[in-house]
Image (cartoon, rainbow, N blue to C red):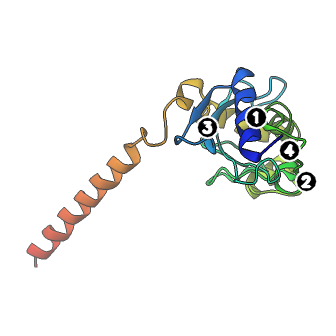
Amino acid sequence: MSSPSKRREMDLMKLMMSDYKVEMINDGMQEFYVHFHGPSDSPYHGGVWRIRVELPDAYPYKSPSIGFVNKIYHPNVDEMSGSVCLDVINQTWSPMFDLVNVFEVFLPQLLLYPNPSDPLNGEAAALMMRDRTAYEQRVKEYCEKYAKPEDVGAAPEEKSSDEEELSEDDYDSSDEAVAGQADP
């Protein structure tokens, strides 16, 4: 490989040709979303997640940054940020790996074999160790609530209901403040 940028371009094209839906974030090839389907022999089966991928300038010598955009219930994924705790991405990355490895091997393995002894989501880890059946039920509930195929298509910018609720709340609270001042 002549340069990291050529390798980045080649790996991205390889990922796109592997039947993964890839959405570019900017004009460059460093940030994009990939639609990832839960492995069939797992409680994540049927779920579809939008994974944000950021490739550092030094890719493939430095690992990609991977994060779940929609919520997932898993001991090794932070529920709020979507950050992934996965040794092969965080510590043992090698330039021999590519983006297809991430989506065909590393992430499916993470979902099939969670590691509750190294959690980012302590609640999920504790439930998994205490009651595997209840853990798997919670995973399925999250899949149904947050990882339906139709949910993945909407970009975070398009889901503005939170912003609208915030502005309505601000409006309501300012009305109360004005009304409160007029009453005394």
Question: Foreground mark, 1 or 3?
Answer: 1
Residue type at mark 2 is Thr
| Residue located beneath label 1 in the image | 11
Assess disc 2: are there few (<14), some (14-19) or many (≥20) residues with their C-alpha within 10 Å of its C-alpha.
few
Question: How far, Cα to Cα, is label 1 from label 4?
Answer: 27 Å
* Cα gap from disc 1 to disc 3, whole angstroms: 14 Å
Q: What is the distance, in whole Å, between disc 4 and disc 3 at their CAs?
A: 23 Å
In the image, is residue 126 above or below residue 150? below
Image coordinates of residue 155 in percent, x first then y, are 49, 37
Residue at the far front: name it. 2
For marks 1 and 2, give the CA distance: 19 Å
Residue annotated with mark 3: 33
Q: CA distance from mark 4 to mark 2?
A: 17 Å
Residue 19: percent from left, percent from top: 71, 20
Please give the residue where the numbered disc 4 appears in the rendered image. Answer: 114
Q: Amino acid at mark 1?
A: Asp
Amino acid type indicated by mark 3: Tyr
**Is 25 situated above or below 17?**
below
**Nearer-the-camera pick, 152 or 172:** 152
The residue wearing badge 2 is 92
The quadrant in which residue 43 appears is top right
Q: Are marks 2 and 3 in contact (CB under 8 Å)?
A: no
Looking at the image, which residue is at 87% across and 37% down? 109
Instruction: Give yes or no for contact between labels 1 and 3 (Cβ–Cβ under 8 Å).
Output: no
Image spot of residue 39 (x, y percent) = 80, 27
Q: Amino acid at mark 4?
A: Pro
Q: Nearer the viewer, mark 4 or mark 2?
A: 2
Query: In which quadrant is the C terminus drawn?
Result: bottom left
Q: Residue at x 76, y 46 (%)?
A: 4
- Estimate how packed mark 1 is, as few (under 14), some (14 to 19) or many (20 or more) residues with alpha carbons within 10 Å: some
